[in-house]
Amino acid sequence: MRFMILVKATPQTEAGVMPEETLIAAMADYHEQLARAGALLDASGLRPSAKGWRIRYADGRPTVIDGPFAESKELIAGYTIIQARSREEALEWSRRFPAPHGDHGESEIEVRQLYELDDFGPSAAMERFRDIAAVGQPKARA
């Protein structure tokens, strides 16, 4: 089972303020523990939304909307993806996650389970995804 730990943004992360060294060290310790346990799949911080964009679809047509975006509490500042044997194991790992914005401020993380290919029924489109996952690229079709 894979889970994504989402770190919510703050006005400071949206302003591009880098974390203090003590937080970077705490995050490094946490991610080293995950790696040693074989549970770490990926992790990274995200640049402020001012550096990003959104694609909005209306009637099937895409429109590009450049950042920054309002409501920093609705944005994501970073993520960690873990592999766990159960929801309970993922919950234990997430409880150990360091306070994302330091010990003196308010912060929040959200944890969501990722869908696995086996969660979807058989279909030609899903077989393409299974092929991609099996070898990292699509198989040639005859």
Image (cartoon, grey):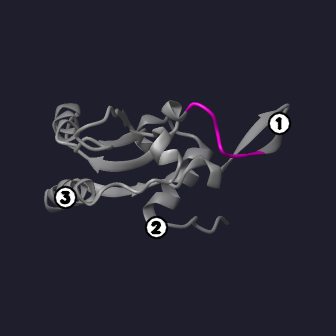
The x, y position of residue 57, in whole percent, is: 78, 36
Count of residue discs: 3
17 to the left or right of 129: left
What residue did someone put label 3 on? 38
Indicate the quadrant where residue 59 lies.
Answer: top right
Query: Callout 1 environment at 10 Å: few (<14), some (14 to 19), or many (20+)?
Result: few
The quadrant of the image that shows the N terminus is top left
Indicate the quadrant where residue 118 lies.
Answer: top left
- Which of the labelled discs sits on residue 60, or is there none? 1
Residue, x 38% and y 41% (percent of image)? 7
- Which of the labelled discs sits on residue 135, or is there none? 2
N-term mark: 3 or 1: 3
The magenta segment is 65-71
Query: Callout 3 environment at 10 Å: few (<14), some (14 to 19), or many (20+)?
Result: few
The mark lying in front, picked from 2 and 3, is 3
N-term mark: 2 or 3: 3
Distance from disc 3 to disc 1, alpha carbons, whole Å, reads: 41 Å
The x, y position of residue 131, in whole percent, is: 51, 59
The x, y position of residue 40, in whole percent, is: 26, 56
The quadrant of the image that shows the C terminus is bottom right
102 to the left or right of 132: left
Q: Main secondary structure of the magenta part?
A: loop
Identify which amino acid the numbered label 3 is placed on: Gly
Kind of element beneath mark 3: loop
Kind of element beneath mark 2: helix
Residue 20 is a magenta residue:
no
User: Relative to 125, does residue 70 appear above or below in the rendering?
Assistant: above
